[in-house]
Image (cartoon, rainbow, N blue to C red):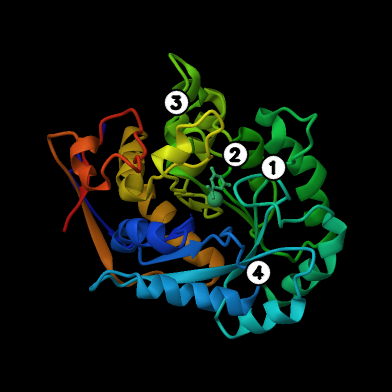
Amino acid sequence: MSEINSITLKKPDDWHVHLRDGDMLKRVLPYTSKDFARAIIMPNLVPPVCTTAEAMAYKQRILSALPNGHNFTPLMVVYLTEDTQPDDLEQGYKSGAIQAVKLYPAGATTNSESGVKDFGKVHHVFERMAQIGMPLLVHGEVVDADIDIFDREAVFIDKVLEPIVQKFPALKVVMEHITTKDAADYIRSKDANLAATITPHHLMINRNAMLVGGIKPHYYCLPIVKRESHRLALVVAAVSGDKRFFLGTDSAPHSDEAKLQACGCAGVFNAPNAIICCATLFEQQNALNKLEGFLSINGPTYYGLPVNEAEITLVKTDKALNLAAEYKQLDGALTVFDPLTPLFWRIKE
Ligand code: DOR
Ligand code: ZN
């Protein structure tokens, strides 16, 4: 373990978050807007955010829900459908209204029903995005009923992603929330156009946390958490300093009522402790010197945006964070990610 008790970083960004809408937006946004300067906002609302105009309207709703004094910029994303218009994307991207496009294979996850069934039908969209340098953000799982849920990411790489990368080598692609050694190795085997986000939960827990000693729905998310060897491969990628890996929390709040069901929703709500989870993990790995790259530098570098000027200081305390006490105001109705390891880091106010 390192002896470092305090570390100052450029303010982090979250390159993948679900802020939802309406009341849920008001409840969860302050956690993201307090700790992060910017975030890539997922568009899988009901109905999804499918055009530049819809993304601009959603951005206004987010800005209206911001607490006073929070300096936060939502980076908007359009949900790719088989009807997406390349001209709309180009105008939105060039005007700065939108930052990226999200590809959900239809049926892969929460609110993905409007996603893509036939990838050939969006090739003309990829072509335009490659021309203008607009990133494609990919939920990397196949949905075939005969593919085991634990294999869906690896199969997606072979069957869907590699053909896209071969056909559109100039396309910038972020493989979101990678969960396997296969994905980490695949990213490293390619050039700088291909990058990946990694979540705090996939870095800190494996599938035993979800399934041993009783089923734990709060650890159920998609892509599903994998075995320990995959978690370790993600940790190696995150702490390596390789610029192609950066934080995307995939914080995806669902009420406890929606999670604790015979058929519960997928998603982990980690916005409140994402940064301190990462600090804890990087310290365990003796890699605190790589934390700023993962949280604050690699993401903007990939997106061609400036690194934040603001800074945050993380301090180490003697007393582990008490999750239940700290997030009491959430009233038990929205459970915060428990990484099953004590958290001794805090963000200095
Ligand atoms: O666990 C997940 N929850 N994975 C996703 O891809 C979507 C997300 C959500 O929106 O709830
Ligand atoms: Zn997500």
The residue drawn where x is 58% and y is 67% is 77
What's the CA distance linking mark 3 and mark 4? Answer: 33 Å
User: Which amino acid, mark 3?
Assistant: Lys
- Viewer-nearest of labels 2 and 3? 3
Q: Which is nearer the N-term, disc 3 or disc 4?
A: 4
Q: Which is nearer the N-term, disc 1 or disc 3?
A: 1
Which quadrant: the N terminus? Answer: top left
Question: Helix or strand or loop: what does disc 1 sit on?
Answer: loop
List the residue tagged with mark 1: 141
Question: Helix or strand or loop: what does disc 4 sit on?
Answer: loop
List the residue tagged with mark 2: 223
The residue drawn where x is 53% and y is 39% is 265
User: Which amino acid, mark 2?
Assistant: Pro
Horizontal side, residue 279 vs residue 155: left or right: left
Q: Are marks 1 and 2 in contact (CB under 8 Å)?
A: yes
List the residue tagged with mark 4: 50
Q: Which is nearer the N-term, disc 1 or disc 4?
A: 4
List the residue tagged with mark 3: 216
What's the CA distance linking mark 4 and mark 2? Answer: 23 Å
Q: Report how many numbered discs are placed on residues in the image.
A: 4
The residue drawn where x is 57% and y is 72% is 99
Crowding around mark 2 (Cα neighbors within 10 Å: few <14, some 14 to 19, many 20+) is many
The residue drawn where x is 46% and y is 62% is 21
Horizontal side, residue 115 vs residue 225: left or right: right
Q: Position of residue 70 (x, y in %)?
A: 27, 70
Question: Helix or strand or loop: what does disc 2 sit on?
Answer: loop
Asked whether mark 3 lies closer than 8 Å to ligand 1, one says: no
The answer, for residue 155, to whether it is visible in the render is yes
Q: Position of residue 53 (x, y in %)?
A: 60, 80
Crowding around mark 1 (Cα neighbors within 10 Å: few <14, some 14 to 19, many 20+) is many
